Amino acid sequence: MKVSRFFFFLIGLFCAALVIYLITTPSTKEIQLTGIITGTDAIVSPLVQGRLQKLLVDEGSQVKAGQLIAQIDPTELRTVRDSATQNIRTLEARLVQANTTLAMNDRQTTAAIQQAEASLTATRAQLEQAKATLSLNEVTYKRNQGLFEGGAISAQDRDTAESNYRGSLANVKALEDQVKAAEAQLEAARANRQQVEVQQADIAATRAQLAQASAQRDQAATQLGYTNLYSPIDGIVSVRVARQGEVVQPGGPVVTVLDVDHLWVQADVEETYVDQIAFGQKLQVRLPSGNTIEGTVFFKGVESDFATQRDVSRTKRDIKAFTIKVALPNPDRRLFAGMTAYVMLPPPPGEPRRFHF
C-alpha cells in the first residue's frame, strides 16, 4: 500500500515538473510567414506607332540586356527622313542664291542712292547759284532799261542786259527741272532699297523653312532609332502580347521580360516582431516542395500596410503588419515568380512555451 502511494506521488511530482518546464522554457518553434516569390519585370513597348515587322523572341526565350527583341517597319519613317533631307538640300541651295543676289542688290542699291544724293546735292547747288545770277541780271536789266529810256545808254547795251536776264531765267528753270529729276531718281533708288528689305525677309523665311525641315529630318531619324526594340534587362520572356505583323501603338506592350536571377519573397510581419528583423539577416525559406533555401533580408517597410488583428471592441490597439523582402538565390532557376514560399522566423527570445491540456 505504501509502495503504491509512493509511486503515485512520483508520477504527480513528474507531471508538475513537466508543466512548469513547458510553461517556463522558451519555445523553439519557428514562426512561419506565407509570402509570394516575385522579381523585376520589364515591359518592352515601342515609342512609335508602326507595324511589327519582326518579332525575334517568344515566351520562354532567354534574352540579355541590349538584345534586339523586335523591329517595327521603318519604311514610312525613312520616307519622311529622306523627303526632309531633300527639302533641306533645296532650301540650302535657294538660300545660297538668295544671299548672293541680296549682296549684289544691296551694293548696287547703296551705290545708286549715294550717287542720286550726290547728284541732287550738286544740282541744288547749281540752282542756288543760278538764282543768284538771275537776281543780279534782273537788277542790271531793269537799270539798263531805265538808262536806255533816258538816253544814257545805247539800245545794244540794253539788249545785252535783257539777253543776260532772260538766259539766267531759262537756266534757273532748267536747273529746277534737273532738281526734280534728281529727286525722282533718289526716290527710285530708295524704292529699290525696299526691294532689298523684301529679299531679306524672304531669306529669313527660307531660313525658318530650313530649320523646320532640319527638325523634321532629325525627328524622323530619332524615330527610326525607336523602330528597334531592345531588352532592358537579362531574363526570360514571360509574356508575349503582340504578334508579328500587328500594328503596335506607343506604350503598348510587346513582350514582358522577367529577371529570374534576382528573385525575392515578399511577406508581412506583425509589428510585435518586425523590430527583431535586420537588414542582411539570413532567414530560412521553405518552398512548397518542402525544400529549404537561405535568403537575405534586403528590404523592410517603413510604414505599416494593414492590421493583422483588428480590435472590434475598441478596448485594445490593432496589431499592424510591415512588409519584408528576402532575396533568394536562384542559380539553377528552380524558382519562378508567383510561387508561394514560407519565410521561417526564429522564435522571439525569451518567449515562454504555451502548453494547453
Image (spheres, grey):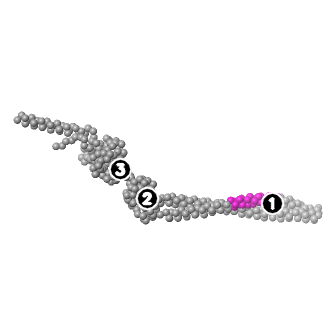
Q: On the image, numbered disc 1 is attached to which residue?
A: 127
In percent of width and height, residue 191 lies at 69, 62
Q: In what element is the residue under mark 2? A: strand
Residue stretch in magenta: 102-131
- What amino acid is found at the position of numbered circle 3 in the picture? Asn
Residue 262 left/right relative to 26 = right
- What amino acid is found at the position of numbered circle 1 in the picture? Leu
Residue found 38% across the figure and 50% down from its top? 262
Residue 73 left/right relative to 282 = right
Is residue 25 something that shows in the picture? yes
Q: On the image, numbered disc 3 is attached to which residue?
A: 330
Q: On the image, numbered disc 2 is attached to which residue?
A: 69
Point out the frontmost of discs 2 and 1: 2
Residue 148 left/right relative to 28 = right
Against 278, is 290 above or below? below
Residue found 86% across the figure and 64% down from its top? 167
- Measured in 3D between alpha carbons, the distance from the residue under mark 2 to the one under mark 1, in whole angstroms, is 89 Å
Dot 1, crowdedness within 10 Å: few (<14), some or many (≥20)?
many
In percent of width and height, residue 73 lies at 47, 63
Q: Main secondary structure of the magenta part?
A: helix
